[in-house]
Structures are given as C-alpha cells and as structure tokens.
Image: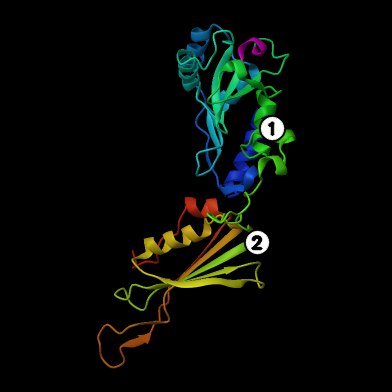
Amino acid sequence: MNQIAAVLGGLQQKISHGSTFIQRKYNEVGQAKFNLPEPVTAASLAAFEAEFNQKLPSEYQTFLELHDGADLFILDDGLGLVLHSLERVIEATNEAIEYELIHEDFDHYWVIGEINEGYLLINREFAKTEDTPYMYWVFHELSTEDADPIGQNFGTFLEYSIIAQGDVFWEFKDFSIEKDDYFVEEDTPEEKVNPPISIRFVDSVRVEIEYPISKNDSYFTISIYEGKFEQEKLGMRYNEGRGFEKVIQSVRDHLSYEQYHFSSIQLFQREHLLQTNEDQSGDPLVRNENLQRQGLRYDGYRAFADQLPRPLPGWE
C-alpha cells in the first residue's frame, strides 16, 4: 500500500469510529466534518494536461486517483483543509490569473485548495522533477509573489496535515503563547471575555428514554449517565415533549456539545411501567404487561448521528 492510501485509510478508520472531535491552536474545538469524494475521472486528467501541457506530480495524482478532492477537519467556522477537485483546480488557477492572485512574474503555480484563510499552491517548475519540495501557501489577500514554501511534496504534506487536524503545521515552530495571545486578552471594564471551554473526556455515556404514560401525555423523560460502567453518574435528567423526533434531536444536541467527547454511547428506550386504562373502568392507570424495551450501542458520536434510533413500535 502506498503512502497516500495508507494515510487516508487511517483517517477513514478514525472517522468510522466517531473520533471527529478535534482541537486546533487558539483552542478551536468542535465536531469536524469530512468529505472524501469518488476518484478523479480519466477525462478530468486529460483536460488538465491539455490545459497546462504538463503532467501532475506523482503523489498528487495518486491522491486524486483515490479521491477527486476532499474536505477534511472542517469546523463550524468553515476553516479546515479543502483540497479541490481537479476540475476546480483548473477553474481556481485560471481565476487566480484573471484576478492577479497569480502574479505575472510568479505565474508558475496551480491553486489546489485552501487552508486556514489561505490558498494551497503547487509550484509547477519544482513539480516537473519533484526533486525540490513543491507545496506552497499564500494568504487570500496576497499574491504568489508572497507565497511561502511549506517545504514538502504532497504526500508528506497530506500526512502532516492530518496529524495536525487540518491546521497549518509548518507555522507551529513560530507559534508563541505570549506573541499570539493564546486564549484571551486581559479583561477590560467595558467587556469581559469568557474563559475557554473546559473539555470533559468521558469514557462512555448511557442515555435512557422513558416513554410517557399515554400518547396524549406527550412528555418523555430523558436521563443521561456519564462515566465507565458501574462508575457512571447521572449527568442530567429532563422532560421533553413534542414527539420522538424532537426527543432524539435534544439528545443529539446535548451529545454534540463542545465540552464533551464520548468514545461509546449506549441508548435505551422503554415504555412506562404504567399505562392509561383505555376502557376508563375503575383505576385510570393499569400496569403495562407488555413493556417494550430497546437497547443500542454506538462507537462514538459520529456513529450515533449517522444512524439515529427509531421509536418503539406503535409510537411512530
């Protein structure tokens, strides 16, 4: 297996296990989004070579033959690593020439993506032999005259970007807590800045959903326990109405909060021990003799979000 395939295979295993909660510098945290499209087509490769009269560097082409572009480690602010499809590379490069992002004296670049408010570039001259690192980066506001070398070819760049969770790893050596005001500035009388969120890493979470006594009584009871089995503690308990879909949405919202990270999620549903006496004779409540139960286990938040539980039969 080549380097590119091995690196992407490891990333896909991480995603499939729900390990998508990330932290970048300046304490940017959250559930990241990923998109790995189908491989590039032969027609797109031919169109690229016809447009620029040059073949792609081997490592970059190997990536495209696995995925025609990718969105990696994208947080809610839209930042992360975006690698364009090859068709988009042609468009972005020609647009950069038109709007003079690609400087006329520094026109030997392809625009292959974006990361952290800047463009990812391949130096076409260096990519011809691949003996000199060809990956470059430039701020959106600047031109290729000011492009900075990353110091790597595509394969190592991709691997290091994944390790750095979509951050600009080549700048880490220059990163200083003092210089970059790592968390917040000093509080001022006019405005008080909230401290950074405290992250709580929890081995597992158990969610219990108790159904209402009747369908006319719309309130479900949700209990959320956190911690290892037999050491778990009740984190919160609340009532939720408006139907089962709203109940699951409230659970999903809670489990996606930035301050939590769960490796395992167990979800149990059960009907109430009592039920409404439908014939209205005698006691208005009777014991539920056919109590329905259901238990599901998920490997992390992503697995839960991708396959949300269905209601018990008769409660759709």
State whether the magenta stretch is mostly helix, strand or loop.
Answer: helix
Percent of width and height locating residue 14: 62, 44
Please say if 206 is above or below 253.
below
Q: Amino acid at mark 1?
A: Glu
| Quadrant the N terminus occupies | top right
Q: Give left or right: position of 91 versus 157.
A: left
Judged left or right of residue 249, residue 101 is right
Secondary structure beneath label 2: strand
Q: Nearer the viewer, residue 148 or 283?
A: 148
Q: Position of residue 223 (x, y in %)?
A: 50, 71
Residue 295 versus residue 300 in the image, above or below: below
Identify the residue position indicated by label 2 in the image: 203
Q: Judge depth for marks 1 and 2 and give the one in front.
A: 1
Q: Earlier in the sequence, mark 1 or mark 2?
A: 1
The type of residue carrying mark 2 is: Asp
| Residue positioned 50% across, 61% down in the render | 254
Locate the C terminus and report the quarter of the image it occupies: bottom left
Which residue is at the far top?
53
Residue 108 included in the magenta stretch of the image: no
Q: Marks 1 and 2, how far apart in space? A: 33 Å
**Relative to the observer, which residue lies in front, 142 or 130?**
142
The stretch of residues the image draws in magenta is: 123-127
The dot on residue 171 is 1
Whether residue 21 is visible to the viewer of this picture, yes or no, is no
Depth check, front residue: 103 or 69: 103
